[in-house]
Amino acid sequence: MINRRKDGELFWCSVSISPVIDGQGQVTHLIGAHVDISERKQIQRQLDVLRNYDELTHLPNRLLFSEYFQRVAEQQARRGGYCAVLAIGISRFKQFNDSLGREAGDQLLQRLALRLRQAAGKRDTVARFAGTDFHMLLVDLESPAVLFERVSTLLAHANRPLSIHGQDVKPVLRAGCSLLAEHGRDLETLMRKAGTALHSAERRGARAGTL
C-alpha cells in the first residue's frame, strides 16, 4: 500500500496484520507491521525500464513493441481499420559515426528518435531494437492510400538538416511498410516484409545517387 509519513511524504510499504485471539477464540486486537519498500519499488521501476526500453533513445524495445502490436491487432480485429508496420533505416550512418565518433553517432540517433516521436500520431509507436534499426506501428489509418502520405510526412520531418557537434548533417532516412492482414497477421512476418521493402528503397536510392 501507499502510506504517508509524518512530514506528508508518500511512500510504498508492505503491511501485514495479525489478529490477537483470547481464550474464548475472540479477536481482541489487531497487530500491524509496516515495512518501507520504497527502495525495492524504485529498483523494480528501473528494471522495468531496462526490460522494456532502449537505453540510448528511451524508445520502446522489441519486447514492448511486440506487446503494443498484439493489443493493436486485437483491436483492429474487433473494430476494423488499418495498421502498418514500418522498418526505418538511416543511410550512411557508419560513415558519419566513423568520421565524427561514437558520441556524435549516439547523439544523432537520439535526435532522430525524437523527431520520429514528434511525427508519430497519438496512438502510433516508435521503437528501436538495436543499432540503426527503428520500427514504427502506425494505427488508425483510414485506408491503405493514407499510408503513403503519412510516411512521406514522417520522413520529411526526420530528414531535415541538423547540427551535431558543430557539424551540419543532412540525415537520409528511408522506410519500408507492410499492412496488417494484407501482408501478414503476425509481427515477424510484417517486419520481414517491411524490411524487404526498406532494402528495395535503399537500393533505388543508391542507384539514384541520393545516399
Image: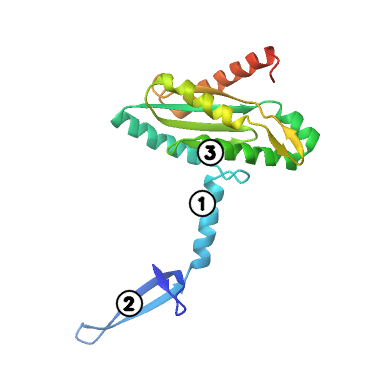
Q: Is mark 1 on a helix, strand or loop?
A: helix
Image depth: mark 3 or mark 2 in front: 3
**Amino acid, disc 2:** Ser
Q: In which quarter of the image is the N terminus?
A: bottom left
Q: Which of 157 and 2 is in front in this view?
A: 157
Q: Nearer the viewer, residue 115 or 57?
A: 115
Image depth: mark 1 or mark 2 in front: 1
**Amino acid, disc 3:** Gln
Please report the residue visible at 61 percent of the width from the left and 46 percent of the height from the top. 55
Residues tagged 3 and 2 counted as in contact (Cβ below 8 A):
no
Above/below status of 88 relative to 114: above
Q: Name the residue under label 1.
A: 48
Question: Number of numbered discs present?
Answer: 3
Residue 158, percent from left and from top: 60, 32
* Scheme of colours in the image: rainbow
Q: Is residue 132 left or right of residue 151?
A: right
Q: What element carries label 2?
A: strand
Between disc 1 and disc 3, whose residue precedes?
A: 1
Residue 127, percent from left and from top: 54, 37
- Residue 18's disc is 2
Q: In this view, does 2 lie to the left or right of 136?
A: left
**Amino acid, disc 1:** Asp
Between disc 3 and disc 2, whose residue precedes?
A: 2
Mark 2 Cα shell of 10 Å, populated few (<14), some (14-19), many (≥20): few
Residues tagged 1 and 2 counted as in contact (Cβ below 8 A):
no
Q: How far apart are marks 3 and 2 (CA)?
A: 52 Å
Q: How far apart are marks 1 and 3 (CA)?
A: 24 Å
Residue 86, percent from left and from top: 51, 27
Q: Name the residue under label 3.
A: 118
Q: In this view, does 50 lie to the left or right of 182?
A: right
Q: Which of 14 and 163 is in front in this view?
A: 163
